[in-house]
Structure formats: structure tokens, C-alpha cells
Image (cartoon, helix red, strand yellow):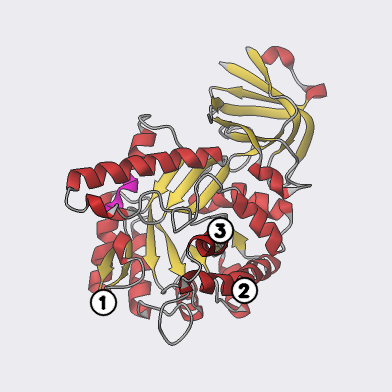
Amino acid sequence: MKTGYTGRWLYTADAAGSCVENFAMLTEDGRIVWVKPQAEAGWAEADTWVDLGDVFVTPGFIDCHVHLAGDPAKEAYESPGREAAGIVCEGAAHARQLLHAGVVACRDLGSYRGYALGIRDAVNRGFLEGPKILACGQAVCARGGHGYEISYEADGVDSMRGAVRQVIKDGADVVKLMVSGGVNSPGPEPGPCELTREEIETGIETAHAWGRKVGVHTHGNTAIRLCVEAGVDSIEHGVFMTEDIMERMAEKGTFLVPTLCAPYYAVEEGIRQEPDNPDHKKSREVLGRHRDVLKRCAEKGVRIAMGTDAGCPFNPFDKAAHEMVLMVMAGLTPKQALDAATRGGAELLELSELGSLEPGKKASFVCLKGNPLERIEAVDEIAALYLDGKEIFLG
């Protein structure tokens, strides 16, 4: 079945960053055959044509850092069945909410008891409607370390190797290491390192040996430095990194997934609901530094992919696209932000069928009410979403 689409404007997000005014796009069985100006279109090639209207089309967004399934409600603790059902159903709803933000693929970097793996499988089998999901299941942390609620705990090199192998045995697409504390964690520096150099190197080496990429939760300078030198694939957050580390990341091709939404919503919503919570006040203190790190990384050529940390406190799934607005507020151009949310995410997650609107790619795209390259806030104004050429109804 060949279906054609027409509309006002289309951003391909290919290497050239092409824009096509008054475009026509031909697809076959959910894959793109060509994209052209309407004046050059072969109208007879399609079995049917769909007029998308006065819209601005971009590739579907990719969120490289979410947490679909968090801790259970306290009342569920005494009922394992109730606990599992509640978390999984909530996680499925979160996946659906990502579609409302135009997200066509996401990477879950830690879920309670690894439940995100089952949500991933349900989407893959067609039981649930949601974005493409890659998941680590449970992360790996130091015993009692940051994020232990969603992690296997490791002590020493042998324990780390076993934990990573267990994650992979569970069915993980990617491995997540919780290397540093949070911005409020006690220690010798902000975001202190909680794993040893040897544990970090073993975790990354083991994951790579099994063909899995590694993302690391790292706020502190020491933790980031050790992970970059050990060959990690992506730094998550990166609040306290220094410029020499940025330069090393650019040299090695290490991605930054900044997750600006995490402190933003902790400040915007967290302080409103919990005005005396010191964690939210600390988030406000690091907002400026966090954004400056992203700007300097972009200037130094560090590869950037969008991630929101949706699922952490007060951080909503259906507002994931707002991460691009925050990126521009930090100093990126709208094009840089949009590329991070499309092609950058596809490159990090190795989703070769997504990330751009080119021949052979999946026809997974977002229809916006405004031009995001002129006004980035348009990414929050979604008119329609298509997955593999099929319109997803967002009612």
C-alpha cells in the first residue's frame, strides 16, 4: 500500500538539515519512499493521498532517558499482585503519555523490579500502544547507593560483573550504572562518585563485551571523568563536569544526555507543592550551571541527545518535548535542539529506522502547529502524530 502525504513544511533532520516547503512524501507499508516539493511529486505513484493541512512536520522525537515504572504506592506493599499490576498499568499509561509529547521512541534507564522490560515487550507484541522502548530493566549501583530502589547493588569488581550479566540475562537492551550520587548527596564533592574506578571499568567492559551500550548517572566531576576515560557511551545529567572533560567527550564521541527537565520541574512544581524541601531548593541552585554545561558542550562539539528523566519527581511524561525549549533557553539553536531530539537520539540508541525523514526510514513523524526552527515552543503544540505511517489518535 502506497500512501502519500502533503503539508506546508517538512524538516528532514538528515545530515544536511533540509527543509521542504509545500512538501509531498510518499510511503509504502509505513516506510518513506521519497520526500519532494509538491511541484515535483509523482501523484500517480500513491494509492491514496492524505492532506495533513497547514502543519510543520518533523521526525518523531526520541527521549533517551525516562523511568516508566517507579516505586509502588505504600498501600500495595503487602500485596505483591496488587503492587505488580499497579506499577505495570501505570507504566503503560506513562508510555501512552509520551506519545502525546510526540515521542516515537524512548530509553528507560531504570524501573522498579525491571518492570519496564515487560512494558517494552507488550508494545513490541502489539498489546499496548506506545513508542518504541529500549530498557535496562534494573540499573546497577553501589550497595546502598543512589537509586538502589531501581537497581541491583554491587560491591567490588566480581559483584559488578555479575550484576551487569544479570541485567543482560533479564533481557536488557542497554546497561545503566548509577556512578555518582545526586546533587544533594553527602560526600567530598557535589555529586560524589559512589563506585570505584575498577568497578566502573568492569561494568562498562562487561556490558560492551555483551554488545550493550552503557549510560551512566553522573553529576560529579570525578564520576564523569572516570566514566569517560573508561569508554562509556553516554553521560546522563553531567551537571558538574569541567571543560577538559567536555573536550575529552568530543574526542571520544561520548554523548551527553542533559535532562534539563529534571531540575526544571523540581523547581517549577516541586517548590510549589513542597516549598520547604531542601532538595528542590538545591535544584534551583544548579539550574544555571546545568544549562551552561549543555551550552559549552555544544560549542565544543560534544554529541547531544535529548532525554528528560520523566518519571522522577514532578517530571511529567506528556511534556517531554519541552526539553527542547529548555535546551534553547540554555543557548542552543532551535535546530540543535531539534536535531538532539531526533537524529541525535537515533544515533545514540542505534535506531537506524528513526531520527530523520529520508528514503528507507519509518514514516514516524510529528505534525506541529508552528515552525520549531523559528519558534522552538512549537514543539509543545502537536496537531498529530504518525507511527509507521499510521495516525495515532491522542484523545
Identify the residue shown where x is 56% and y is 47%: 319
The image position of residue 243, as x and y in percent, is: 63, 78
Observer-nearest of 248 and 309: 309
The image position of residue 266, as x and y in percent, is: 52, 63
> Disc 2 designates what residue?
289
What separation in Å lies between label 2 and label 1 (alpha carbons)?
33 Å
Going by the picture, which residue comes out furthest to the right? Answer: 39
> Disc 3 designates what residue?
261
Amino acid carrying mark 1 in the image: Gly
Tag 3–tag 1 contact (CB < 8 Å): no
Identify the residue shown where x is 64% and y is 53%: 324
Circle 2 SS class: helix
103 lies above or below 261:
above
Q: Is residue 336 magenta?
A: no
The image position of residue 201, as x and y in percent, is: 37, 73
Query: From the viewer's perspective, is the residue at label 3 or at label 1 nearer?
Result: 3
Circle 3 SS class: helix
261 lies above or below 281:
above
Q: Which image quarter holds the N terminus?
A: top right
229 lies above or below 42:
below
Q: Which residues are magenta?
A: 113-117
Badge 2: how crowded within 10 Å, few (<14), some, or many (20+)? some
What separation in Å lies between label 3 and label 1 (alpha carbons)?
33 Å
Mark toward the start of the polypeptide (2 vs 1): 1
**Mostly what secondary structure, the magenta segment?**
helix
The image position of residue 295, as x and y in percent, is: 68, 67
